[in-house]
Amino acid sequence: MNVAPERHGFTRGSGMIAIAGEVALCDPRGALFFPDMRLLVVSDLHLEKGSAFARRGRLLPPYDTGATLDLLDTVIADHRPATVISLGDSFHDGFGAERMPSIYRDRLLSLMAGREWIWVAGNHDPDAPADLPGVVAGELALGDLRFRHEPLAGAEPGEIAGHLHPGAVVVQRGRAVRRRCFATDGERLVMPAFGAYTGSLNVLDKAYQGLFRWERFFAHMLGTNRVYTVAHHRLRR
Amino acid sequence: MPVYAGGKFPLSTYLAAEVRSMLADSERWRKLPEQVADWLAIQSEKSVLPKAGDLLVETFPRGNRHYMVAYPFEGRLAHQTLGMLLTRRLERAGAHPLGFVATDYALAIWAHSDMGALFRSGELPLSALFDEDMLGDDLDAWLAESWLLKRTFRACAVIAGLIEKRHPGQEKTGRQVTVSADLIYDVLRTHDPDHILLRATRADAAAGLLDVSRLADMLSRIRGRIMHKDLDRISPLAVPVMLEIGKERVKGDADEMLLSEVEEDLVHEAMGD
């Protein structure tokens, strides 16, 4: 439980939480790391979102993939995971991996080298990414943890999901601060979106109804160098 | 204060000099309407009125914030640029500036920390804060990451058809599939700094927002002539600019500090304090 992190030996601001009994670290860059399993989880990379829009006539700058990979590179370099789970919507559409320029493909391949890599299928990318190594899974179970892209209402404890792009707003001293966040009640967790072109949806939106026990809910909001843990009753729309 | 219909043109340099000399010379107040003369008299009693060539800087607390008001009388654009550069420096000095507002004759900055104490203790001398070197690196660095530039970029991006403007009443639907102009701006700045939209943004900003040359003249004029008045409360001269507050905000460490405060509350609750 992460009700009072200090009581469980976690120091404030360390980003350490427990999900269904597993200890995890909320990295302020938007990735979740399980030190015991050397497992890194990222969600909603939305690679090639810029070029996906371009295909439909909206010419957004096509550099988002590079920005996302740069960030992923720093996270992987810091945690050196043995396994990486990309929790769905890794590519913005089914042709993203095909369309990805070779410089980015090579960078992604070098990030994948020497570690196990699992692509969980998302609604944007239900099929395996073309020509890329790694295992493709619709859903994944590791111990008591369940990894799937879309959170299910009333799912079992231990579910780690993405899809919703959670964000949180607090108002303090008359000022609103909005950040992407890890959304969790200690039993299940929804990951923030990792991609450079991804927005966020307030955790108080009705899309989150039925997912959490709100009295135990915390938003771990992404700060510059650390995450900030905020209880449900302090959040605003 | 001179006001024109529309009120958006900055004071001319001549007019600004005339206003400054009028304020400095109590003999000339008699020609002003009675209320204005009274207002100035109360100002000289509660605080001080600057000599014609001097820059008056007042600091005072109000609510749970600390305010600094400077009266350069150089027009709104130059003040706005000055406000952006000063808040950068204050941020670096650890004063946690929250925002600023510029009018034609004054500039107000508000912060979490007591700026008056910083100036008094010599930790951040006013002469250093207002040093002309801010127009070098600080201006360049500010231009590179400015949220004001981002706002100008948004206008350019809308004109280019890159993004659509949301209108009041049009709700966001579901997850945000739209791409915010800020994200595009950051990506372009990193990968294509010479992009035509960024060039257009810089050109728009230089013309519309900066007035750098006038600011440079002002900074050299006031060197060694800054008068600091640390007050317990707002001065009469500060009232008009304080009424404008709520227009601009600074993004930076202050946001992180607010998040930290909210988190602190949570710890107290959890511990039953």
Image (cartoon, coloured by chain):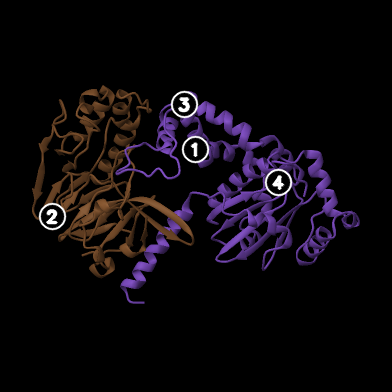
Residue A16 point in image, percent of width and height? 26, 58
Mark 4 Cα-neighbour bin, 10 Å: few <14, some 14–19, many ≥20: many
Query: Disc 2 residue type?
Result: Ala
Q: Which residue is mark 1?
A: B150
Q: Residue B86's spot in the image, x, y percent?
A: 61, 48
Q: Where the C terminus of chain B falls, by quadrant?
A: bottom left
Of the chain colours in the picture, the one used for chain B is purple
Corner quadrant of residue B64: bottom right
Q: Of helix, strand and loop, which one carries label 3?
A: loop
| Coordinates of residue B173 in the picture (x, y in percent) | 32, 43
Q: Residue furthest bottom?
A: B273
Q: Is disc 4 placed on a helix, strand or loop?
A: loop
Residue beneath the point at 17% across and 48% down: A38
Would you name the residue on which mark 4 appears?
B104
Say the numbered circle drawn on residue A155.
2
Label 1 environment density (alpha carbons within 10 Å; few <14, some 14–19, many ≥20): many
Q: CA distance from mark 3 to mark 1?
A: 15 Å
Q: Nearer the viewer, residue B171 or B207?
A: B171
Amino acid type at image mark 4: Asp
Task: Of the two numbered discs 4 and 1 on the same chain, state the one appearing first in sequence.
Answer: 4
C-alpha span from label 2 to label 4: 60 Å
Q: CA distance from mark 4 to mark 3?
A: 32 Å
Name the secondary structure under disc 1. helix
Cα–Cα span, label 1 and label 2: 42 Å
